[in-house]
Amino acid sequence: MSVTVSTNDGVTLAYEKRGTTGPSVVLIHGWSGSRQYLKQSIDSLAETCQVYAVDLRHHGDSGRPAFGYHVARLGSDLNDFLVSLDLKDVYVVGTSMGAAVIWSYIENYRTARLAGAVFVDQAPLQYAASDWKLGSKGCYDPASLAALQHALKADFKGFAAENGECCLSQPQPPEVLDPLTNETLRCDPETLGRIMADHTQLDWRPLLPTIDIPCLNLVGSLSGVFPPEGCAVLGDMIPDCKTVFFETANHWLYIEEPKKFVDLINKFVDVKTRADIAHNSSV
């Protein structure tokens, strides 16, 4: 069951709150997903944390206005969410594009409300550049973006089905896969293309050294979306950031390795055990 808050431009953001004690953790899903992608994590984390799982605008149960197709707007929505619920000392967890939403939030609102951040399999720049060749495997220049936008409009059902094939390496039963596909199909394909056009060309590398909170960077070694090295650079560019590789997992590592994912977050949000996480380690 979800409830809503309103953004400063009048859009409703749906979320669910689980758990009654422990650190506050806000889960932010990726492009074309919803909070339902993190259902296993929500249920498990709620045993030790107060979990807030939010649907980004244009996704899940949140509003779908005819505007706001930019990561900067999604970052502003995150600020509206935190302010509306008066959340402080929060740990934010962003999967894929959700990581970029956090970076946008930090760029504009800094970190006074944040206790820490977790980034899940997202490179700081998806496009290729003269000094960067470790971005997206599938959306790395204007031509590949145009191809993605065409695929979304030409066969959205096919795209939604193939998305799982790209983002998962371990076989999943229909009861896991079907709800994910259905959540993607709730989105508007043209809107997804417009959001991706903004997201994929943003270069967050200059921002990363300014992040002044503890961070955890989780990388899928078998990711079909990014080369692991492209995501791993976060651990070197952010001053207080540890990288952990999920050796047998793909982009949706929280679905393939849910226990390892939750265990690491629990360890990270507990100041007493955070130091036990080794940088550039594997699970």
Image: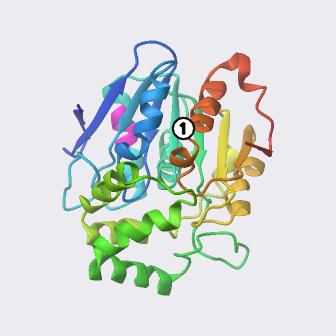
Quadrant for residue 13, please give it: top left
Which residue corresponds to the image point at 19% horizontal and 62% vertical from the top-left?
66
Task: Please name the amino acid that badge 1 sits on.
Answer: Arg
Q: Which residues are magenta?
A: 77-81
Identify which residue, 75 or 54, lies in the foreground. 54
As drawn, is 7 to the left or to the right of 203? left
**Residue 118 image point, x, y percent:** 59, 39
Which residue lies under the disc numbered 1? 110
Q: Is residue 127 above or below residue 210?
A: below
As drawn, is 147 to the left or to the right of 168? left
**Residue 113 image point, x, y percent:** 50, 27
Q: Is residue 191 above or below residue 86?
A: below
* Quadrant in which the N terminus is drawn: top left
* Quadrant in which the C terminus is drawn: top right
Which residue corresponds to the image point at 26% horizontal and 60% vertical from the top-left?
187
**Residue 134 image point, x, y percent:** 69, 69
